[in-house]
Image (tube, rainbow, N blue to C red):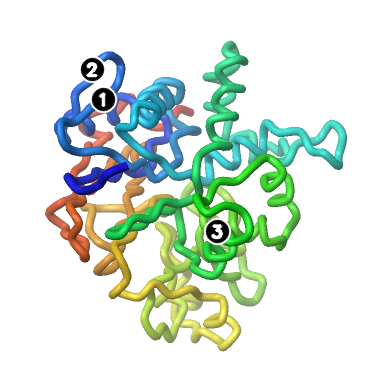
Protein backbone atom coordinates (compact mmCIF):
# COMPACT_ATOMS: atom_id res chain seq x y z
CA UNK A 1 0.00 0.00 0.00
CA UNK A 2 1.20 3.51 -0.82
CA UNK A 3 0.70 6.00 1.99
CA UNK A 4 2.00 9.14 0.30
CA UNK A 5 -1.47 10.63 -0.10
CA UNK A 6 -2.82 9.78 3.33
CA UNK A 7 -4.33 6.86 5.20
CA UNK A 8 -7.37 6.63 7.45
CA UNK A 9 -7.06 4.23 10.38
CA UNK A 10 -10.32 2.78 11.73
CA UNK A 11 -10.86 1.25 15.16
CA UNK A 12 -12.69 -1.83 16.44
CA UNK A 13 -15.97 -2.28 14.52
CA UNK A 14 -17.49 -5.43 16.11
CA UNK A 15 -20.25 -5.82 13.57
CA UNK A 16 -21.40 -2.18 13.52
CA UNK A 17 -21.68 -2.14 9.73
CA UNK A 18 -24.15 0.74 9.47
CA UNK A 19 -21.83 2.93 11.53
CA UNK A 20 -18.88 1.82 9.39
CA UNK A 21 -20.66 2.85 6.21
CA UNK A 22 -21.45 6.27 7.68
CA UNK A 23 -17.88 6.72 8.91
CA UNK A 24 -16.42 5.82 5.52
CA UNK A 25 -18.76 8.30 3.84
CA UNK A 26 -17.84 10.94 6.40
CA UNK A 27 -14.19 10.34 5.48
CA UNK A 28 -14.96 10.89 1.79
CA UNK A 29 -15.21 7.27 0.61
CA UNK A 30 -17.98 6.16 -1.73
CA UNK A 31 -19.14 2.69 -2.70
CA UNK A 32 -18.22 1.87 -6.28
CA UNK A 33 -19.01 -1.59 -7.68
CA UNK A 34 -19.28 -2.99 -4.16
CA UNK A 35 -16.05 -1.46 -2.84
CA UNK A 36 -15.61 1.70 -0.78
CA UNK A 37 -12.97 3.88 -2.46
CA UNK A 38 -11.39 7.30 -2.07
CA UNK A 39 -9.71 9.19 -4.89
CA UNK A 40 -6.48 9.69 -2.93
CA UNK A 41 -6.64 7.91 0.43
CA UNK A 42 -6.67 4.33 1.76
CA UNK A 43 -7.72 2.64 5.03
CA UNK A 44 -6.04 0.52 7.68
CA UNK A 45 -8.33 -1.40 10.02
CA UNK A 46 -6.93 -2.22 13.49
CA UNK A 47 -8.86 -5.49 13.90
CA UNK A 48 -11.85 -6.76 15.90
CA UNK A 49 -14.41 -6.89 13.12
CA UNK A 50 -16.34 -9.83 14.61
CA UNK A 51 -18.40 -10.59 17.76
CA UNK A 52 -21.00 -8.65 19.74
CA UNK A 53 -22.59 -6.52 16.99
CA UNK A 54 -25.66 -7.04 14.82
CA UNK A 55 -24.10 -6.93 11.32
CA UNK A 56 -20.93 -9.02 11.44
CA UNK A 57 -21.24 -10.62 8.01
CA UNK A 58 -21.89 -7.24 6.40
CA UNK A 59 -18.89 -5.78 8.21
CA UNK A 60 -16.66 -8.58 6.91
CA UNK A 61 -17.96 -8.02 3.37
CA UNK A 62 -17.22 -4.28 3.49
CA UNK A 63 -13.74 -4.65 4.94
CA UNK A 64 -12.69 -7.68 2.95
CA UNK A 65 -13.83 -6.16 -0.36
CA UNK A 66 -11.67 -3.10 0.38
CA UNK A 67 -8.66 -5.20 1.34
CA UNK A 68 -8.91 -7.43 -1.72
CA UNK A 69 -9.30 -4.40 -4.00
CA UNK A 70 -6.16 -2.79 -2.57
CA UNK A 71 -8.15 0.00 -0.90
CA UNK A 72 -7.37 -1.12 2.65
CA UNK A 73 -5.16 -3.21 4.89
CA UNK A 74 -5.92 -4.84 8.22
CA UNK A 75 -4.20 -6.30 11.26
CA UNK A 76 -5.61 -9.17 13.29
CA UNK A 77 -7.56 -8.42 16.46
CA UNK A 78 -7.90 -10.65 19.48
CA UNK A 79 -11.52 -11.36 18.56
CA UNK A 80 -10.54 -12.72 15.14
CA UNK A 81 -7.88 -14.87 16.81
CA UNK A 82 -10.30 -16.05 19.52
CA UNK A 83 -12.91 -17.00 16.94
CA UNK A 84 -10.37 -18.90 14.87
CA UNK A 85 -9.31 -20.85 17.98
CA UNK A 86 -12.93 -21.43 19.03
CA UNK A 87 -13.69 -23.05 15.67
CA UNK A 88 -10.40 -24.99 15.24
CA UNK A 89 -10.21 -28.54 16.60
CA UNK A 90 -7.22 -29.46 18.72
CA UNK A 91 -4.55 -31.80 17.33
CA UNK A 92 -3.84 -33.26 20.74
CA UNK A 93 -7.26 -33.34 22.43
CA UNK A 94 -9.82 -35.17 20.26
CA UNK A 95 -13.24 -33.58 20.39
CA UNK A 96 -11.85 -30.39 21.91
CA UNK A 97 -11.10 -27.03 20.37
CA UNK A 98 -8.14 -24.67 20.71
CA UNK A 99 -10.39 -22.33 22.69
CA UNK A 100 -12.59 -24.22 25.09
CA UNK A 101 -16.33 -23.92 24.57
CA UNK A 102 -17.01 -22.66 28.07
CA UNK A 103 -20.06 -20.48 28.78
CA UNK A 104 -17.80 -17.41 29.03
CA UNK A 105 -16.00 -18.06 25.74
CA UNK A 106 -19.22 -18.98 23.96
CA UNK A 107 -20.93 -15.83 25.18
CA UNK A 108 -18.20 -13.69 23.60
CA UNK A 109 -18.49 -15.27 20.13
CA UNK A 110 -22.23 -16.02 20.18
CA UNK A 111 -23.23 -13.27 17.75
CA UNK A 112 -20.67 -14.43 15.21
CA UNK A 113 -21.76 -18.06 15.61
CA UNK A 114 -25.41 -17.10 15.18
CA UNK A 115 -24.86 -14.90 12.14
CA UNK A 116 -22.83 -17.57 10.31
CA UNK A 117 -24.92 -20.55 11.51
CA UNK A 118 -26.75 -20.90 8.17
CA UNK A 119 -23.70 -20.02 6.10
CA UNK A 120 -21.07 -22.73 6.77
CA UNK A 121 -19.15 -22.13 3.54
CA UNK A 122 -18.94 -18.41 4.29
CA UNK A 123 -17.77 -19.17 7.82
CA UNK A 124 -14.99 -21.45 6.60
CA UNK A 125 -13.99 -18.78 4.11
CA UNK A 126 -13.89 -16.26 6.97
CA UNK A 127 -11.66 -18.54 9.06
CA UNK A 128 -9.27 -18.99 6.13
CA UNK A 129 -9.17 -15.22 5.60
CA UNK A 130 -8.52 -14.54 9.29
CA UNK A 131 -5.50 -16.83 9.19
CA UNK A 132 -4.01 -14.72 6.38
CA UNK A 133 -4.29 -11.41 8.28
CA UNK A 134 -0.91 -10.07 9.50
CA UNK A 135 -0.40 -9.35 13.19
CA UNK A 136 1.06 -5.90 12.53
CA UNK A 137 1.94 -3.37 9.86
CA UNK A 138 4.93 -1.06 9.71
CA UNK A 139 5.76 1.77 7.33
CA UNK A 140 8.36 4.54 7.43
CA UNK A 141 5.93 6.91 9.13
CA UNK A 142 3.61 4.69 11.18
CA UNK A 143 3.05 1.34 12.89
CA UNK A 144 -0.19 -0.54 13.52
CA UNK A 145 -0.91 -3.40 15.92
CA UNK A 146 -4.12 -4.32 17.67
CA UNK A 147 -2.99 -3.90 21.29
CA UNK A 148 0.75 -3.57 22.02
CA UNK A 149 3.93 -2.92 20.05
CA UNK A 150 6.08 -5.39 21.98
CA UNK A 151 9.49 -4.89 20.37
CA UNK A 152 11.33 -8.03 21.56
CA UNK A 153 8.50 -10.36 20.50
CA UNK A 154 8.02 -8.56 17.18
CA UNK A 155 11.72 -8.78 16.36
CA UNK A 156 11.75 -12.51 17.06
CA UNK A 157 8.50 -13.08 15.16
CA UNK A 158 9.91 -11.40 12.07
CA UNK A 159 13.25 -13.16 12.21
CA UNK A 160 12.01 -16.67 13.06
CA UNK A 161 8.48 -16.88 11.63
CA UNK A 162 7.77 -14.39 8.85
CA UNK A 163 9.02 -10.95 7.90
CA UNK A 164 5.47 -9.80 7.15
CA UNK A 165 4.17 -10.98 10.54
CA UNK A 166 1.79 -13.57 9.12
CA UNK A 167 1.31 -16.88 10.88
CA UNK A 168 0.05 -20.33 9.90
CA UNK A 169 -2.30 -22.80 11.53
CA UNK A 170 0.54 -24.65 13.26
CA UNK A 171 1.58 -21.39 14.91
CA UNK A 172 -2.03 -21.00 16.08
CA UNK A 173 -1.98 -24.50 17.59
CA UNK A 174 1.30 -23.78 19.40
CA UNK A 175 -0.08 -20.46 20.65
CA UNK A 176 -2.45 -22.32 22.97
CA UNK A 177 0.48 -23.73 24.97
CA UNK A 178 0.69 -21.38 27.94
CA UNK A 179 3.81 -19.21 28.04
CA UNK A 180 5.19 -20.58 24.77
CA UNK A 181 6.70 -18.03 22.39
CA UNK A 182 3.63 -18.30 20.17
CA UNK A 183 1.33 -17.79 23.15
CA UNK A 184 3.23 -14.67 24.21
CA UNK A 185 3.11 -13.21 20.70
CA UNK A 186 -0.66 -13.57 20.42
CA UNK A 187 -1.30 -12.53 24.00
CA UNK A 188 0.87 -9.40 24.06
CA UNK A 189 0.32 -8.12 20.52
CA UNK A 190 -3.42 -8.80 20.44
CA UNK A 191 -4.39 -8.36 24.11
CA UNK A 192 -1.67 -6.08 25.43
CA UNK A 193 0.54 -6.16 28.47
CA UNK A 194 -1.04 -6.75 31.84
CA UNK A 195 -0.16 -7.02 35.49
CA UNK A 196 -1.52 -9.31 38.18
CA UNK A 197 -3.53 -7.73 40.97
CA UNK A 198 -1.60 -8.00 44.24
CA UNK A 199 -2.70 -10.15 47.18
CA UNK A 200 -4.79 -12.44 44.95
CA UNK A 201 -7.45 -9.76 44.62
CA UNK A 202 -10.20 -10.01 41.99
CA UNK A 203 -11.99 -7.27 40.05
CA UNK A 204 -15.34 -7.51 38.29
CA UNK A 205 -15.16 -5.61 35.02
CA UNK A 206 -17.93 -3.61 33.35
CA UNK A 207 -18.64 -6.54 31.04
CA UNK A 208 -19.30 -8.78 34.05
CA UNK A 209 -16.11 -10.86 33.97
CA UNK A 210 -13.97 -11.54 37.01
CA UNK A 211 -10.36 -10.53 36.41
CA UNK A 212 -7.17 -11.07 38.36
CA UNK A 213 -5.08 -8.90 36.00
CA UNK A 214 -5.34 -5.32 34.80
CA UNK A 215 -4.23 -3.92 31.45
CA UNK A 216 -1.15 -1.72 31.42
CA UNK A 217 0.28 1.11 29.36
CA UNK A 218 3.41 0.46 27.35
CA UNK A 219 4.32 4.14 27.09
CA UNK A 220 4.47 5.22 30.75
CA UNK A 221 7.66 7.16 31.51
CA UNK A 222 9.19 6.36 34.89
CA UNK A 223 6.00 5.04 36.53
CA UNK A 224 6.00 4.81 40.31
CA UNK A 225 2.55 3.47 41.28
CA UNK A 226 -0.03 1.16 39.76
CA UNK A 227 -2.22 4.10 38.81
CA UNK A 228 0.61 5.30 36.55
CA UNK A 229 0.37 2.23 34.33
CA UNK A 230 -3.28 1.10 34.37
CA UNK A 231 -5.00 1.46 30.98
CA UNK A 232 -8.54 0.13 30.91
CA UNK A 233 -12.09 1.46 31.41
CA UNK A 234 -12.40 -0.18 34.84
CA UNK A 235 -10.53 1.86 37.44
CA UNK A 236 -8.41 0.10 40.03
CA UNK A 237 -9.74 0.12 43.59
CA UNK A 238 -8.22 3.10 45.37
CA UNK A 239 -6.12 1.01 47.73
CA UNK A 240 -4.53 -0.74 44.74
CA UNK A 241 -4.15 2.34 42.56
CA UNK A 242 -1.68 3.88 45.00
CA UNK A 243 0.26 0.65 45.48
CA UNK A 244 3.97 1.18 44.64
CA UNK A 245 5.30 -0.74 41.66
CA UNK A 246 7.86 -3.35 42.62
CA UNK A 247 11.03 -4.16 40.68
CA UNK A 248 9.22 -7.26 39.46
CA UNK A 249 6.30 -5.15 38.24
CA UNK A 250 8.61 -2.77 36.39
CA UNK A 251 10.42 -5.63 34.70
CA UNK A 252 7.12 -6.71 33.08
CA UNK A 253 6.48 -3.36 31.42
CA UNK A 254 7.29 -2.46 27.84
CA UNK A 255 8.17 1.07 26.76
CA UNK A 256 7.36 2.84 23.51
CA UNK A 257 9.34 6.09 23.50
CA UNK A 258 7.80 9.40 22.39
CA UNK A 259 10.39 9.83 19.62
CA UNK A 260 9.33 6.62 17.83
CA UNK A 261 7.08 6.70 14.77
CA UNK A 262 3.32 7.17 15.14
CA UNK A 263 1.58 4.06 16.48
CA UNK A 264 -2.10 3.13 16.12
CA UNK A 265 -3.84 0.54 18.30
CA UNK A 266 -7.37 -0.53 19.21
CA UNK A 267 -8.64 -2.96 21.86
CA UNK A 268 -8.79 -0.82 25.00
CA UNK A 269 -12.37 0.51 25.24
CA UNK A 270 -11.53 4.19 25.61
CA UNK A 271 -14.24 6.65 26.60
CA UNK A 272 -15.10 10.29 25.99
CA UNK A 273 -13.90 12.43 23.12
CA UNK A 274 -11.10 10.80 21.11
CA UNK A 275 -7.62 12.13 21.84
CA UNK A 276 -4.02 10.86 21.85
CA UNK A 277 -3.07 8.49 24.66
CA UNK A 278 0.56 9.56 24.21
CA UNK A 279 2.18 12.16 21.92
CA UNK A 280 2.77 9.53 19.23
CA UNK A 281 0.11 6.89 20.07
CA UNK A 282 -3.58 6.83 19.18
CA UNK A 283 -6.03 4.25 20.50
CA UNK A 284 -9.00 3.98 18.13
CA UNK A 285 -11.28 1.71 20.18
CA UNK A 286 -14.07 3.78 21.70
CA UNK A 287 -16.54 0.96 22.32
CA UNK A 288 -18.69 1.42 19.22
CA UNK A 289 -20.66 -1.75 19.91
CA UNK A 290 -21.31 -0.62 23.49
CA UNK A 291 -23.03 2.54 22.20
CA UNK A 292 -19.81 4.52 22.14
CA UNK A 293 -18.02 5.83 19.05
CA UNK A 294 -16.63 4.25 15.90
CA UNK A 295 -13.41 6.21 15.48
CA UNK A 296 -10.95 6.94 12.66
CA UNK A 297 -7.77 8.96 12.49
CA UNK A 298 -6.75 10.83 9.30
CA UNK A 299 -3.00 10.31 9.06
CA UNK A 300 -0.86 12.37 6.71
CA UNK A 301 2.64 11.53 7.87
CA UNK A 302 2.80 13.72 10.96
CA UNK A 303 5.17 12.43 13.70
CA UNK A 304 2.76 13.22 16.51
CA UNK A 305 -0.95 12.55 17.00
CA UNK A 306 -3.13 15.59 16.30
CA UNK A 307 -6.38 15.62 18.28
CA UNK A 308 -8.15 17.53 15.50
CA UNK A 309 -7.66 14.64 13.05
CA UNK A 310 -9.91 12.15 14.84
CA UNK A 311 -13.22 11.54 13.05
CA UNK A 312 -16.05 9.48 14.48
CA UNK A 313 -19.63 8.27 14.42
CA UNK A 314 -21.52 8.46 17.70
CA UNK A 315 -23.27 5.10 17.65
CA UNK A 316 -25.73 5.89 20.45
CA UNK A 317 -27.01 9.04 18.73
CA UNK A 318 -26.64 8.14 15.06
CA UNK A 319 -27.08 4.36 14.91
CA UNK A 320 -28.50 3.08 18.20
CA UNK A 321 -29.46 -0.22 16.53
CA UNK A 322 -25.75 -0.87 15.89
CA UNK A 323 -25.08 -1.54 19.58
CA UNK A 324 -24.44 -4.95 21.12
CA UNK A 325 -27.25 -7.46 20.99
CA UNK A 326 -28.53 -9.06 24.16
Dot placed on the residue nearer the N-terminal end, 3 or 2: 2
Mark 1 residue element: strand
- Work out whether residue 258 or residue 71 is closer to the camera in this orientation and state it: 71
Q: Which residue is mark 3?
A: 158
Q: Are the residues tagged 3 and 1 within 8 Å (C-beta)?
A: no
Q: Residues within 10 Å of mark 2 (few under 14, many from 20)?
A: few
Left or right: where does residue 100 sit relative to residue 256? right
Find the distance from the CA under tag 2 to the CA under tag 1: 6 Å
Rendering quarter of residue 90:
top right
Q: Residue at x 42, y 60 (%)?
A: 232
Find the distance from the CA under tag 3 to the CA under tag 1: 31 Å
Q: Residue at x 37, y 29 (%)?
A: 63
Mark 3 residue element: helix
- Work out whether residue 140 or residue 208 is closer to the camera in this orientation and state it: 140
- Residue 36: assigned label: 1
- Residue 32: assigned label: 2
Above-or-below relation of 273 to 96: below
Left or right: where does residue 129 sit relative to residue 275? right
Above-or-below relation of 91 to 197: above
- Residue 231: assigned label: none
Above-or-below relation of 171 to 236: above
Q: Are the residues tagged 2 and 1 within 8 Å (C-beta)?
A: yes
Amino acid sequence: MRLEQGVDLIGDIHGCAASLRLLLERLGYSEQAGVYRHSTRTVIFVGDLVDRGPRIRETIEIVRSMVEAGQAEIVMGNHEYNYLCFRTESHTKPGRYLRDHTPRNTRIVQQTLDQYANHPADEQDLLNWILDIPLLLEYDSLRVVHACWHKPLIQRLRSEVSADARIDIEFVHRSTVHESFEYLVMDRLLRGTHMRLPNNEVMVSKDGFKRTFFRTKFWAQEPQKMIDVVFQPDPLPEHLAMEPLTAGNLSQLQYYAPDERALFIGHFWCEGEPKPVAPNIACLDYSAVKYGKLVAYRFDGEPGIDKSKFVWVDVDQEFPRDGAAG
